[in-house]
Amino acid sequence: MRPVYMVAGGITKFSKASPNKDFRYMVKESFDSAMTDVPDLTLERIDGSVVSYFSDHFTRQLMAGIMVQDYLGLTPKPSRRIESGGATGGMCFQNAWESIASGRMDVVVASGFETMSHVNTWKGNEFIALASDTNFDYPVGGFYTGYYAMMVKRHMYEFGTTVEQLAAVSVKNHKNAMHNPYAQFPAELTIQDVLNSEMVSDPLKRLDICVMSDGAATALLASEEMAYKLTDKPIRITGVGTGTDAMRMADRPSREVILLPHENPEDYKDLKYPGVHSFRGGRVAAKEAYKMAGIQNPLEELDFVELHDAFTSSEIQTYEDLGLCKYGDGGKFVESGAADLNGKVPVNPTGGLLACGHPVGATGLMQAVFAFWQLQGSIGKHFGGDDALQLKNPKRGLIHSHAGTGTYITVSVMERGF
Amino acid sequence: MADNNIRNAKLEEVEQGCVLYNLDPIIMKYHYEVDYIHSYAQDSPFFAGLAKGELKGSRCTKCGSTFATPRSHCMTCGAPTEWMDLPLTGKIHTYTTCYFGGQEFLDETPFTLILVEWPGVDTFFLSRLVGMAPEDVHIGMEVKARFRRLSQFKPTDVYFVKA
Ligand SMILES: [Zn+2]
């Protein structure tokens, strides 16, 4: 495998609706924004693309991937579409990584989008719920917030996680986004605001849940030789990992905990795993990525994490899957301030899905772009001069993308290459 | 003759108009619906069972893994499974009450979803709990299956009540 670098990234401002730009135009905007940062990169030097979007229902246009390729001016080069539920963007990023690592391409475009504004919120929820088993799950009351509510209910039962701890995630991520001009829903909130917001699916309330969005994001990946030609601040992708679990969250038989290098079997003597309280696929993805990147203890060796917080609960569950704390300690982890902007390992320093929005096919790529700018030290440059969210000298970050009830999960590790 | 045909040629005018939300850009609404022919295929005996008041899971013929939500092949070893009857009484593994939902189920809110567990069965079963105030539901509570009299051939042909 060859070393792979990210050389530029771009995103659109995520919004509730973008009627003035269709999906092609939005992707083009994110693509052009990325291209601006690598002036020596011409269309001729691009070898191909990977285009991701989640739902044909939202787009109501089959083969939208080729329409993006066409609009970007990249035909007749290779391209393909990637779909893997909520993890679509993260999977697109890894698929582009494979194109470079394998030697097939030297420069590849990874672009993703979603246009969720074309139906009302409740129809949107129905479309998303079609990503659950349509024989056994969807007809019972298909609603993803309901599924995650059941998962965190069990987390609370097993480990004593509280609604205040869930709310703390919402407060943190919305607050971080106050300095992110791309965020759809920045807000100064209190724990009480979150607890007082409308109950959606007990215990998850309106402010525990991300919103639906229109948006696009692009990451440009390159081989080592090309990367250093195109930029003096390339970011190396040093680890990728992907995990899966059964589509039905009812299908989660108990197994041994999958251990990370810094953990012991005694840590989890009586834990039934994964149950519905933990995402085994997230642990598998982390383990693979850590091994490739040579990470022994993630809490000590990661400078920040951008993870998939579609729900406040999934952020807490993901701290544990990633090994930032032990299984069961996720609630205490956020409460301790360890995940704060100035904490031990800032988690979602740019606001996460909760505050930035979640245009599904773009989300995982948005994380890659934010992580890329963090590692370059170019947050201020890209955030209109506001560098409040720029971490001090970060060397290594992690991005994490996640699909419904933990079915597909990607973890990628990015490191400063200069 | 040909010239006459061309002069009279036109696409038929229609009078249903369209629903326009905005002109710049043009945003319009149209209806989008399909009738879909779905087969339960190898899962059919489960739904047929519900119509007879039976709740069927499956058991692996090779490694003995048991599944409360049936599947025709084992998720552990890949061997074929056989049908097995689940007890009609189980326990709540986890639950939630939904106050919102997908459009199809909005009229039914609030409704309570549960995962049912049975001792010795390796996986769970998603269902609705009815007849309980949300605040009275708890993990570990015993529940029993009840069946719709008029089958819809959907998983909601079975639901649970407090045992
Ligand atoms: Zn088996």
Image: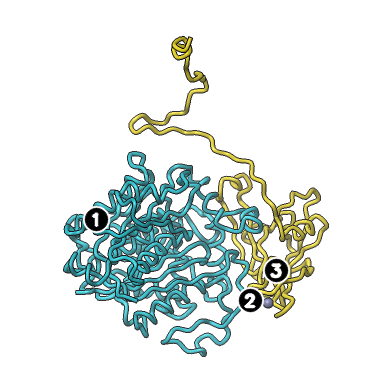
Q: Chain of mark 1?
A: A
Marks 1/2 in contact by CB < 8 Å: the verdict is no
Identity of the residue drawn at 66% across and 58% down: A136
User: Where in the figure is residue B9, as x and y percent of width and height?
Assistant: 47, 16
Which quarter holds ligand 1? bottom right
Query: Can you tell me whether the CB of the residue at mark 3 lies under 8 Å from the nearest atom of ligand 1?
Result: no
Asked whether, in this view, residue A250 is left or right of residue A128, the answer is right
* Residue labelled with disc 3: B68
Report whether residue A176 is seen: no
> Which quarter of the image is occupied by the C terminus of chain A?
bottom left
> Which quarter of the image is occupied by the N terminus of chain A?
bottom left
Asked whether, in this view, residue A18 is left or right of residue A122, the answer is left
Query: Can you tell me whether the CB of the residue at mark 2 lies under 8 Å from the nearest atom of ligand 1?
Result: yes
* Residue labelled with disc 2: B76
Q: Which kind of residue does numbered mark 1 sit on? A: Glu
User: Where in the figure is residue B141, as x and y percent of width and height?
Assistant: 69, 69
User: Where in the figure is residue A102, as x and y percent of width and height?
Assistant: 36, 71
Q: Which kind of residue does numbered mark 3 sit on? A: Ala
Q: Chain of mark 3?
A: B
In 3D space, how far apart are the residues under numbered discs 3 and 2 (Cα atoms)? 14 Å
User: Dot 3: what SS?
Assistant: loop
Identity of the residue drawn at 73% across and 73% down: B59
Residue A97 falls in image quadrant: bottom left
Pick the front one: B162 or A77: A77
* Residue labelled with disc 1: A44
Chain that is coloured yellow in the picture: B
Identity of the residue drawn at 28% across and 61% down: A220
**Nearer the N terminus, badge 3 or badge 2?**
3
Q: Residues within 10 Å of mark 3 (few under 14, many from 20)?
A: many
Q: Closer to the observer: label 1 or label 2? A: 1
